[in-house]
Image (spheres, grey):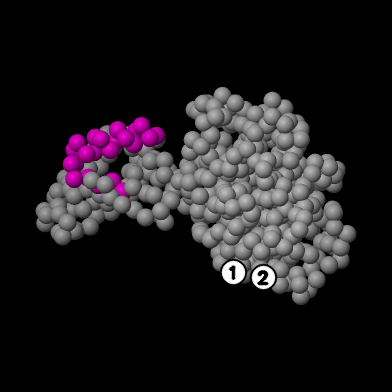
Amino acid sequence: MEDYEKMEQPHVLNFNDIKQAIENIEGTVIHTPLCEAKISKYMDYNIYLKCENLQYTGSVAERGVRNAFCCSENAAKRGVVVPSNGSMALAAAYHGRALGVPVMVVLPERTPPALVHRCSELGADVVMYGENVQDATNYAQKVADESHRIIMRSDDPAVMAGLGTVGVEIVTQLPELDAVIVPVASGGLLAAILVACKKLKCSCLVYGAECAKVPKMMKALQAGKPMNVPVTPNLAEGLNASSVGANAFATIRGKLDRMLVVEESSIAQAMVSVLERERLVADGAGVCAVAAVIQGLVPELRGKRAVCVISGGNIDCGRLSRNIQRGLGASGRLLRFSIPVPDHRNGLANLAKVISEQNVVLKSMVTDQMPVYCDVGATWANVVVETGSDEQAASFKDHLRDVYPRARFTISDLDDKHKHSCRP
């Protein structure tokens, strides 16, 4: 990336920056709980969750934003402009109002209306621009140049220092921890937690986790410098930075223990697991660390104490509902299949009886005459059922194929543009 090439000395975060940030933000952000994850009971891991989704505006971004405001003497006078996918915008709006700082947030046009409304409700001027956060950032830079507002990014040293306070809390709450897994957007949170944890406990492993559809940190580590990657829609939209920040990369380079690239299907499953078992609402970005464990990317952490940072929970109800459905589909608990059944009064009734006897829940059944694909005496039934587990789903499939040999199950692949294929 050209900016990194031109920057002779990117800022490398140090622990003294984080110590000062602790003093700056004390009493203004929540000391979030560190909870032993209930999913540990079903896995070979000792997982703990650092619940930053319980901050007032629902994300870890509050720590960085508050510290940045405290470190800037001109913020209240000049105002700030914040490009964001949502979480940083909410944090800036909330703390800007508390400190009397005029805040303009620039959000991509695809941002959910509920999140836009919350930013306005908190007192920010909201501008919608572009397809993604990179477009929003470019526009925010133009606004900053023309209006002399201060542009705030997650890669700013003061923001990173504030984010590092969560690493200090983690080690304080669980001194015997062995590893921390951190979701990665532009890298500021990962860099800050790495500095804090390595300083306070040098044996602690620090891993980053990002969505496979936007692997900007992995590409940067492979190339030895920040690289631009295409931003494609995915469930972890809060991590959709097109490149790693120069300061974050300079801080991380040569010190990170591992970088994990997580499939979107695992993110969907992690959202459902965190909601059902932990009773926590988290967005796709927030659960990326948990998804890495679910996907089996960290077998070396079995039996060790690993902390997964739940970085945020800013997801509107409509998107949460859709993501739950995708998560259930990815885990096999929502099954979609098609069956030709006899076109007489007992045809559908017998199918419903078979489904009921297997103790699965019928969610949808739509019939259609398809003589091209089956004989004229049959009706094509498209069915969706919900099961309780992978084991029950497998048993149901076997039984249904015994009764209806021509049954076709649809396989949902979240990591291939949500395409469907049918397996006989």
Q: Main secondary structure of the magenta part?
A: helix
Instruction: Please name the residue that numbered disc 2 is placed on.
Output: 139
Relative to 138, residue 312 above or below: above
Q: Which residue is most to the bottom? A: 146
Q: Which residue is most to the right? A: 73
The circle on residue 188 is none
Q: Position of residue 31 (x, y in %)?
A: 75, 39
Res. 399 image quadrant:
top left
Report the quarter where the N terminus lies: bottom right
Confirm whether the magenta stretch covers residue 397. Answer: yes
In this picture, residue 47 sits left or right of residue 164: left
Classify mark 1: helix, strand or loop.
loop
Q: Position of residue 234 (x, y in %)?
A: 50, 55
From where the camera sits, is residue 343 visible?
A: yes
Q: Residue at x 30, y 33 (%)?
A: 395
Q: How many marks?
A: 2
Assess disc 2: are there few (<14), some (14-19) or many (≥20) residues with their C-alpha within 10 Å of its C-alpha.
many
Instruction: Please name the residue that numbered disc 1 is placed on.
Output: 130
Q: Residue at x 79, y 59 (%)?
A: 97
Q: Name the kind of residue labelled 1 in the image.
A: Gly
Marks 2 and 1, the one that precedes in the sequence = 1
From where the camera sits, is residue 35 visible?
A: no
Assess disc 1: are there few (<14), some (14-19) or many (≥20) residues with their C-alpha within 10 Å of its C-alpha.
some
In magenta, the rendered stretch is 389-410
Confirm whether the magenta stretch covers residue 234. Answer: no
**Do callouts 2 and 1 mark residues in contact (Cβ within 8 Å)?**
yes
Q: Position of residue 48 (x, y in %)?
A: 62, 32
Give the camera-side residue of 293 and 8: 8
Q: Position of residue 378 (x, y in %)?
A: 14, 52
